DNA sequence: CCGAAGACCTGCTGGC
DNA sequence: TGCCAGCAGGTCTTCG
């Protein structure tokens, strides 16, 4: 899915398109994101929340297909289509979002270096890649962007947190911001199913340096693909130490 | 407490 | 061409 840049792209687009419309009589007052969850707020204080998991799509005025799981009809005749080929995604109506918002660690784009360092010292034995993907540790980073962030920081995905130098921690921190922001600018990464709220593919996949890449763009070394905690990890064994 | 593995689903790809 | 294993961007739960 849909990691932070993809959900944020959808959020920005939907915010433009649906704020002010009514759904079942309730007026939409905002579209927010927390971690990889999209939140649509109504004027009565209730919210609709969505998790797209691996293959979910939220498309404004999209055409229903065999993968369409739900169609939301607005008062003006426009629609929001929820598609999900693998059915892992979900949506639900909630009275308040505080509880679910508290389930996650700090937002990846909001955390500062000092807090990032403090959090890392609490997890000395963790491997850096799975830790970056742990939503309770830091919210928004998934498999693609953890690979890309670690390549940019020149840190191997299996490194234990306690072995990271100050310099490496700073590089990881800076590249979390840099890469997530760049991916948002390019409307996210479309590897297979991801489409934005306009039904368009994201453009960031062509900038991937290691995810689904054969050779390192810096040194030409064959990109290694390994399993870490059941997920694929891609890295350059020469550039990343 | 931690990490690994399996479960949840469907669709696509590559190899035989 | 047909079948089948293997693989997918994410969480959860279970187990050792």
Image (cartoon, coloured by chain):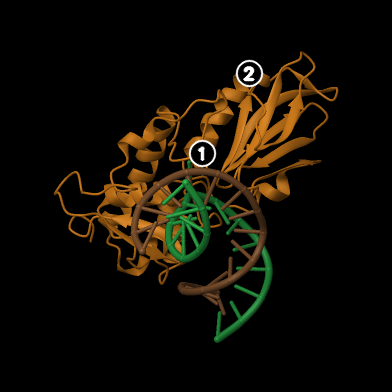
Chain colours: A orange, B brown, C green
Q: Which disc is residue A131 wearing?
A: none
Could you tell me residue A34's position as x and y percent?
Answer: 60, 42
Packing grade of label 1 (10 A; few <14, some 14-19, many >=20) is: some
Could you tell me residue A224's position as x and y percent?
Answer: 27, 59
Q: Nearer the viewer, residue A48 or A72?
A: A72
Q: Residue at x 76, y 15 (%)?
A: A77
Q: Residue at x 56, y 30 (%)?
A: A10
Measured along the vertical axis of the image, is residue A128 above or below residue A27? below
Number of the front mark, 1 or 2:
1
Q: Which residue is mark 1?
A: A193
Q: From the viewer's perspective, is C2 left or right of A154? A: right
Q: From the viewer's perspective, is A153 left or right of A193? A: left
Q: Which circle's residue, 1 or 2, is located before the other in the chain?
A: 2
Q: Quadrant of residue A239?
A: bottom left
Q: Residue at x 65, y 31 (%)?
A: A65
Measured along the vertical axis of the image, is residue A22 above or below residue A34? above
Give the Cα distance between marks 1 and 2: 22 Å
Q: Nearer the viewer, residue C1 or A91?
A: C1
Q: Which disc is residue A17 wearing?
A: 2
């Amino acid at each position: 899915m849909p990691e932070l840049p993809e959900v944020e792209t959808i959020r920005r687009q939907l915010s433009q398109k649906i704020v002010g419309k009514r759904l079942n009589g309730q007026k939409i007052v905002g579209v927010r994101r927390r971690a990889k969850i999209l939140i649509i707020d109504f004027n009565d204080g209730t919210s609709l929340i969505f998790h797209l998991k691996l293959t979910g799509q939220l498309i404004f005025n999209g055409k229903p297909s065999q993968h369409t799981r739900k169609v939301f009809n607005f008062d003006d005749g426009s629609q929001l289509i929820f598609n999900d080929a693998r059915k892992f995604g979900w949506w639900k109506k909630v009275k308040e979002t505080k509880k679910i918002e508290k389930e996650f660690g700090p937002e990846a784009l909001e955390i500062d270096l000092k807090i990032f360092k403090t959090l890392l010292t609490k997890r000395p034995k963790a491997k850096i890649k799975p830790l970056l993907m742990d939503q309770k540790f830091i919210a928004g980073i998934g498999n693609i962007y953890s690979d890309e962030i670690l390549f940019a920081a020149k840190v191997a995905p299996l490194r234990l947190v306690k072995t990271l130098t100050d310099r490496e921690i700073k590089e990881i921190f800076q590249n979390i911001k840099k890469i997530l922001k760049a991916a948002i600018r390019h409307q996210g990464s479309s590897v297979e199913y991801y489409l934005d709220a306009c039904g368009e593919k994201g453009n960031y996949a062509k900038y991937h340096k290691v995810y689904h890449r054969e050779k390192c763009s810096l040194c030409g070394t064959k990109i290694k693909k390994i399993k870490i905690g059941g997920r694929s990890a891609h890295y350059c064994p020469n550039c990343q130490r």
